[in-house]
Amino acid sequence: MTKQVEYFLGANSRHGFQSFYDDLFCDPRIEKVWIIKGGPGNGKSTFMRAMGAVAAERGLEQEWILCSSDPDSLDGIIIPAVKLAIVDGTAPHVVEPQVCGMDAEYLNFSACYRDGMRQDAAEILDAQQKNKARYPLVYTCLSAAGTLSQQIRQIAAQQLPDGKLEQLTQGIIHAEFQQPGQQPGVIRRFVSGITPKGLQYRLEALQDYRLYSLTDTFGLSDPLLQLLKQAALEKGYFCIAGHSPLEPERLEQLLIPQLKLAFVRTSQQLAYHGATFCQIDLDALVPLPELDKNHMPFFVCTIKALVQEGIGYLQEAKAQHDRLELLCRPYVDFSAVSALRETYAQRLHKLIDKVKKA
């Protein structure tokens, strides 16, 4: 059975929608990107699932990029064996080639619409506007949650003993980073996401990893993971940096595939419940005064409530997007979609044949 990894390249965050999609052009495993351009309901996600089925049929591993506004929908797929990525390049995660024709090509799904949609224009525009109107409310909630999270970090930083975090990090480096690396580099991912289905963790692929679980209420995992990432790169390891969906500038996971090693933050807001090799309680490093201890439960509960409120608005936005897809779907020429799917499936088979013959 072929391996399928899932993650996000876009996040609903305190800063609004944050995209790592342009990182596809910096990924050393990718040489070509098929960029799909098209509207709602015209088969973009189904097309990518069909390409994934071709890869699975031929025994190739793949990576699925999930939509942060609907984690049951695909925004992209990567097939490393043929150095190919296929992505939905429409808003809000607009993707454009660096050198059109060289590293990417467009797939025009808009050509698969039939005439006549104008008669439903008023209702379609209404659904679009109501969908967009929910997102400022989402990001207001997440911004407030991020501000409180920052306040917690400031309180903890004032109490953290000097050198304590660095001492812990050096111990991990000495224990784990012994063999030489083979390919230094780093790619960014969102392993978790704030979605209409709630807070989502996508760590199923780490079942065969040796995993460190970092219990962290105060935001200490980011500086620890940054130190580990720098040490791993200096040692020559290829790293997957998992960023926080709430605060994308901060790390919450670090994966080192060569060592089958992972470090994962776990908190009251987003807990990791899988098997672990080692559990490290970062909270125990911070001797908080009684006054600050009394404030912490309020901060943590308020952050959780604000994120949950934002999720509620995401659910309302998704309901309008679902309505939009239903309005547009009757005008899709699915025979044209099928023809496009068959054409690119044949192209993918040829790419796979070329790799297997090499």
Image (cartoon, grey):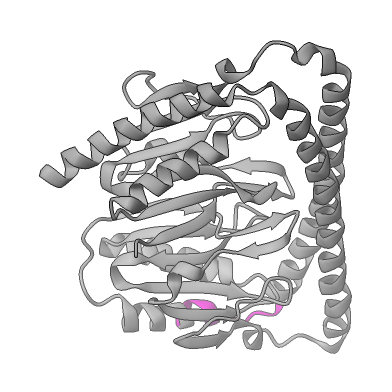
Q: Nearer the viewer, residue 119 or 311?
A: 119
Residue located farthest toward the front when viewing the structure as drawn: 335
Q: Is residue 302 left or right of residue 357?
A: right
Q: Residue at x 36, y 34 (%)?
A: 345
In the rendered view, would you say 158 is above or below 6? below
Q: Residue at x 76, y 34 (%)?
A: 326
Q: Position of residue 243 (x, y in %)?
A: 56, 57
* Chain part drawn in magenta: 159-167
Q: Position of residue 336 (x, y in %)?
A: 52, 21
Count of marks, rendered view: 0
In the rendered view, would you say 309 is above or below 124? below
For the C terminus, give its image quadrant.
top left
Q: Nearer the viewer, residue 70 or 324?
A: 324
Q: Position of residue 251 (x, y in %)?
A: 55, 61
Q: Residue at x 45, y 79 (%)?
A: 211
For the N terminus, give its image quadrant.
bottom left
In the rendered view, would you say 163 is above or below 249? below
Which image quarter: residue 94?
top right
Which image quarter: residue 194?
bottom right
Q: Is residue 296 left or right of residue 90?
A: right
Residue 163 visible within the image: no
Indicate whether residue 76 is drawn in magenta: no
In the rendered view, would you say 56 is above or below 318? below
Q: Position of residue 339 (x, y in %)?
A: 45, 24
Q: Residue at x 70, y 48 (%)?
A: 12
Indicate whether residue 160 is drawn in magenta: yes
Residue 347 visible within the image: yes
